[in-house]
Amino acid sequence: MPNVPIHSVAAHPSIQARAVSYSLDLADRHGRTLTAAGLYISLVVIYGWFGGMKFTAYEAEGLVGLVGNNPLLSWTYSLFSVRGFSSLLGILELSIGALIAARLFNPAYSLVGGLLSAGLFATTLTFMVTTPGVLVPELGFPAISVAPGQFLLKDIGLLALSLWIAIDSLVALRPTSA
């Protein structure tokens, strides 16, 4: 059998350059759309899961230490039972998730959902200051507990995602020029 040279893609820079260019073009054309869809879907899943859990006694009792120590929300327990407040919060969270998902129909819905979501996460971030056990002073700054500290800290990212969804939805509402 004769020696036949094997040509690799690396031996043909023009083929390699075209492959890279094609990949970048695909990422440019579809990457943002896929990324945005993933971000919307992730927040919808979070709200669906967290919102659904609010109807359980387990979740309602888990909120007592957070809500009960927060001056912005502690008064709600004088109006509602622990389970009643948790259920109302569940309705709010499921509604926010539905509004964000409704981006498929009209970006105005996800704009409202993103703003409500940002407000909710801004509120939960206040728990970082008002909830006992967030800081671990014996370990020094910046040590925080796993729960509730690190559990609450993730809300910084979810707040940023909520604001991104609101802005992305607002931009989508802008009239396009013909």
Image (spheres, grey):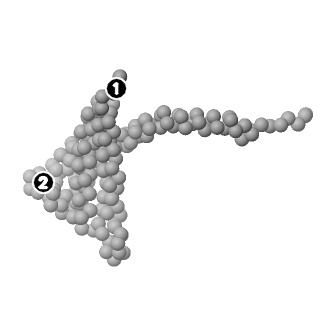
Q: Is residue 2 above or below residue 153?
A: above
Q: Quadrant of residue 52?
A: top left
Cα separation between marks 1 and 2: 48 Å
Residue that lies at the very extreme toward the bottom in this rendered image = 138
Q: Quadrant of residue 106?
A: top left
Q: Quadrant of residue 131?
A: bottom left
Position in image of residue 58 (x %, y %): 26, 54
Q: Around disc 2, counting alpha carbons within 10 Å, would you say few (fewer than 14), some (14 to 19), or many (20 or more)?
A: some
Position in image of residue 132 (x %, y %): 24, 67
* Residue bearing mark 1: 177
- Mark yes or no: residue 25 visible: yes
Q: Is residue 15 above or below residue 72?
A: above
Q: Of helix, strand and loop, which one carries label 2? A: helix
Name which residue lies at 26% across and 46% down. 117
Position in image of residue 76 (x %, y %): 12, 54
* Label 1 vs 2, first from the N-terminus: 2
Q: Of helix, strand and loop, which one carries label 1? A: loop
Q: Is residue 42 above or below residue 142?
A: above
* Residue bearing mark 2: 76
User: Disc 1 vs disc 2: Cβ atoms closer than 8 Å?
Assistant: no
Amino acid type of the residue tagged 1 in the rendering:
Ser
Is 175 displayed left or right of 91 in the figure?
Answer: right
The residue closer to the viewer here, 63 or 155, is 155
The residue closer to the viewer here, 98 or 117, is 117
Amino acid type of the residue tagged 2 in the rendering:
Thr
Task: Kindly report which numbered mark, 1 or 2, lies closer to the viewer in this rendering.
Answer: 1
Residue that lies at the very extreme toward the front in this rendered image = 177
Name which residue lies at 9% across and 56% down. 78
The quarter of the rendered structure image containing the N terminus is: top right
Name which residue lies at 21% across and 64% down. 130
Is 57 displayed left or right of 2 in the figure?
Answer: left
